[in-house]
């Protein structure tokens, strides 16, 4: 019995400091929690284009040779635009036999060779000429066009600053309705879910969108010229966003 009593006493002593610590950590100040979102629109200064070449023949070496010839012609045409060879990289290569009836492997069609290569374009005004030249050499596919900015970090920080200002403005207006004022921030969180940017263009064929259904509190335009580069393709804008959640103290 004595052993049990001592054990219970030690357990109680161990629990008491924990309860005391939790009580000390509890913040009973009046608070208001708000979110703020901002979008900074910028003109992309780098474009990554992914091309695809598909050839086939009943003879595997002939199918491969056809593919290699198109690739060599495409690289030569692309280099004529002043694009360094280091910016032209092979991304994927596959060779597979195909049949009319794949399950039973009957009625052989031929060997299909697929070659995917990526071109990084720093001179964005050459994007249409790049695409045209590549297609004229026999390239079959354009798998994707990725619009980027080399100053992403700078614009992301700018969007974050604007999001914090939007959160503060929202908190001020909400508190004013309650005849209160906003004090110091108690907690700040940045929401990182989803993609931090999306792209839209006036030509829907090339627009590459990410999370286009977003809401926003602030839009800041950072763009010089109109971005028009041809009658067919017009560079759009990259929308770099930031979203924050802030808890402020409320003061009567």
Image (tube, rainbow, N blue to C red):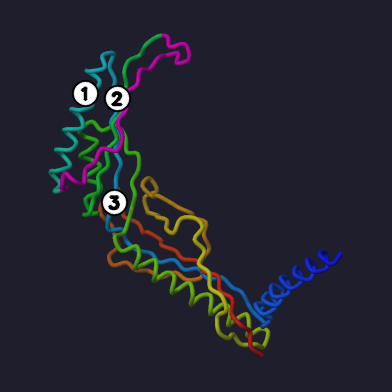
> Residue 249, percent across and down?
61, 83
Please tell me the numbered disc located at residue 140. Answer: none
User: Against 91, is 236 above or below?
Assistant: below
Quarter placement of the C terminus: bottom right
Packing grade of label 3 (10 A; few <14, some 14-19, many >=20) is many
Packing grade of label 1 (10 A; few <14, some 14-19, many >=20) is some
Q: Residue at x 43, y 12 (%)?
A: 105
Figure quadrant of residue 235 = bottom left
Packing grade of label 2 (10 A; few <14, some 14-19, many >=20) is many
Q: Which residue is drawn at 32% across and 22% down?
A: 112
The magenta segment is: 83-106
Please tell me the numbered disc located at residue 113. Answer: 2
Label 2: which secondary element: strand
Please tell me the numbered disc located at residue 66. Answer: 1
Looking at the image, do the residues carrying marks 2 and 3 touch, with CB atoms under 8 Å apart? Answer: no
> Residue 66, percent across and down?
21, 23
* Main secondary structure found in the magenta portion: strand
Q: Does the magenta stretch include residue 167?
A: no
Quarter placement of the N terminus: bottom right
User: Against 146, is 184 above or below?
Assistant: below
Looking at the image, do the residues carrying marks 2 and 1 touch, with CB atoms under 8 Å apart? Answer: yes
Please tell me the numbered disc located at residue 47. Answer: 3
Q: Residue at x 36, y 59 (%)?
A: 237
Question: Alpha-carbon distance for marks 3 and 1?
Answer: 28 Å
Label 1: which secondary element: helix
**Closer to the observer: label 2 or label 3?**
2
Which is more N-terminal, label 1 or label 3?
Answer: 3
Q: Does the magenta stretch include residue 91?
A: yes
Which is more N-terminal, label 1 or label 2?
Answer: 1
Label 3: which secondary element: strand
């Amino acid at each position: 019995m004595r052993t049990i009593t001592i054990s219970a006493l030690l357990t109680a002593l161990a629990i008491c400091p924990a309860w005391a610590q939790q009580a000390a950590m509890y913040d009973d100040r009046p608070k208001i929690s708000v979110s703020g979102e901002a979008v900074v629109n910028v003109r992309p200064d780098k474009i990554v284009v992914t091309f695809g070449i598909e050839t086939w023949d009943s003879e595997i070496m002939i199918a491969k040779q056809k593919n290699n010839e198109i690739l060599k012609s495409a690289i030569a045409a692309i280099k004529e635009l002043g694009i360094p060879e280091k910016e032209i990289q092979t991304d994927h290569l596959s060779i597979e036999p195909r049949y009319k009836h794949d399950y039973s492997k009957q009625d052989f069609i031929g060997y299909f060779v697929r070659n995917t290569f990526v071109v990084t374009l720093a001179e964005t005004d050459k994007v249409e000429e790049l695409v045209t030249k590549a297609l004229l050499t026999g390239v079959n596919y354009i798998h994707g066009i990725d619009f980027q900015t080399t100053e992403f970090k700078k614009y992301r920080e700018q969007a974050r600053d604007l999001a914090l200002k939007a959160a503060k403005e929202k908190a001020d207006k909400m508190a004013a309705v309650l005849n209160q004022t906003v004090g110091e921030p108690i907690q700040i969180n940045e929401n990182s879910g989803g993609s931090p940017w999306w792209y839209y263009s006036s030509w829907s064929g090339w627009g590459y969108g990410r999370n286009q259904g977003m809401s926003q509190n602030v839009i800041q335009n950072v763009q010089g010229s109109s971005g028009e580069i041809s009658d067919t393709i017009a560079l759009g804008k990259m929308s770099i966003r930031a979203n924050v959640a802030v808890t402020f103290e409320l003061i009567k």
